[in-house]
Image (spheres, rainbow, N blue to C red):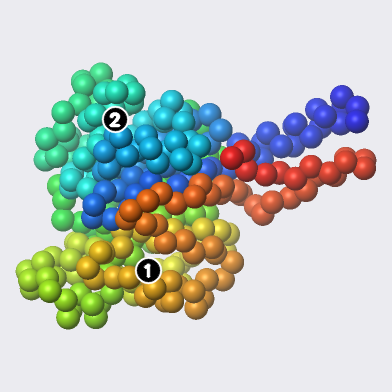
Amino acid sequence: MSCNNVNFIQNLVTPFFNMSLFIASLNSGSNGNCYYVGNDNEAVLIDAGISCRETEIRMKRLGLLLRKVKAIFISHEHSDHINGVSVLSKKYQIPVFVTPDTKREGRLNLKEDLSFSFKAYEPVSIGNISITPFPKLHDASDPHSFLLASDTVKVGVFTDIGSPCEHVIRNFQQCHAVFLESNYDEEMLETGRYPIQLKNRIRNGKGHLSNKQALDLFLQHRPTFMSHLLLSHLSDQNNTHKIVRDLFSKKPGNTKIIIASRNKETPVFHIRHSPRRTISVGQDSYSQLSLF
């Protein structure tokens, strides 16, 4: 094959990979939340609620490099979202983006030169990844969710949501892939052992999203190009993988449904702008595949 053909392939493949993101849940649940979103050159973590050690172990198992992580974004101050951030930031000199209220309420001990603030709907650029925070309903001081974009590919991290407000809906409609909370089964919560005060806190519109609410959001507002839905932050006491799987498997459409575990990492998923294509040049064919 001639050099001209090689250059032609490279010119086609490179923009394609620039229009893609790699994503994984390192852990998802009340025992710790941490989500990875990256491209070929850089990555960010949304929340760091598991220990630095566990973050290292799980990323290594996935073949992900911590040196590519250029920033950590904190959604709110609850311990399952911040437990590992101070150690991780200090050890790897990773900047942390957190609102002043969240930093204060979480009592985060961050190096001054590694601590940065953000505001709703003011995008932050980390290399070729744009991160747009937006407000959500949750019982925290200044909670946010995030829409991450690399060129035209967009990934949402929408957990700890009391109800699907207009901010959530508008951003959900843009996503090629989403980490979406599906926290509790309504019947299990109602008949479970939690005290009534805790039950009401969970379902009062500023707590967590039920399976039914998550399904309604998915069915009513998913875009036709949504390829992956990672159902996240499942309750250990008020939900089961089977309930969620059965509920969402009825009408998945063209969207791959994944349940993020509270005990281990998911695989890495390659989120593309369009389905995999094969480029043919003369008699040679080259599939555009994940770099992992």
Q: Residues within 10 Å of mark 1 (few under 14, many from 20)?
A: some
| Residue 88 marker | 2
| Residue 117 marker | none
Q: Hey, which quadrant is residue 291 in on the image?
A: top right
The picture places residue 158, in percent across and down from the top left corner, at 35, 54
Say if 165 sits above or below 24 in the image. below
> From this viewpoint, is residue 117 visible?
no
Say if 196 sits above or below 27 in the image. below
Residue at which label 1 appears: 241
Tell me the quarter of the image containing the N terminus: top right
The picture places residue 265, in percent across and down from the top left corner, at 41, 49
Residue, far top:
113
Q: Secondary structure at mark 1?
A: helix
Tell me the quarter of the image containing the C terminus: top right
Residue at point 25%, 18% (across, down): 113
Q: Nearer the viewer, residue 292 or 14?
A: 292
Measured in 3D between alpha carbons, the distance from the residue under mark 2 to the one under mark 1, in whole angstroms, is 30 Å
Q: Earlier in the sequence, mark 2 or mark 1?
A: 2
Q: Amino acid at mark 1?
A: His
Q: Hey, which quadrant is residue 162 in on the image?
A: bottom left
Residue at point 44%, 68% (across, down): 218
Say if 245 sits above or below 78 in the image. below
Q: Amino acid at mark 2?
A: Leu
Number of numbered callouts drawn = 2
Q: Nearer the viewer, residue 43 or 240?
A: 240
> From this viewpoint, is residue 103 visible?
yes
Residue at point 20%, 62% (across, down): 207
Left/right placement of residue 282 relative to residue 19 reads: right
Left/right placement of residue 280 relative to residue 168 reads: right
Q: Secondary structure at mark 2?
A: helix
The picture places residue 122, in percent across and down from the top left corner, at 35, 38
The picture places residue 171, in percent across and down from the top left corner, at 41, 55
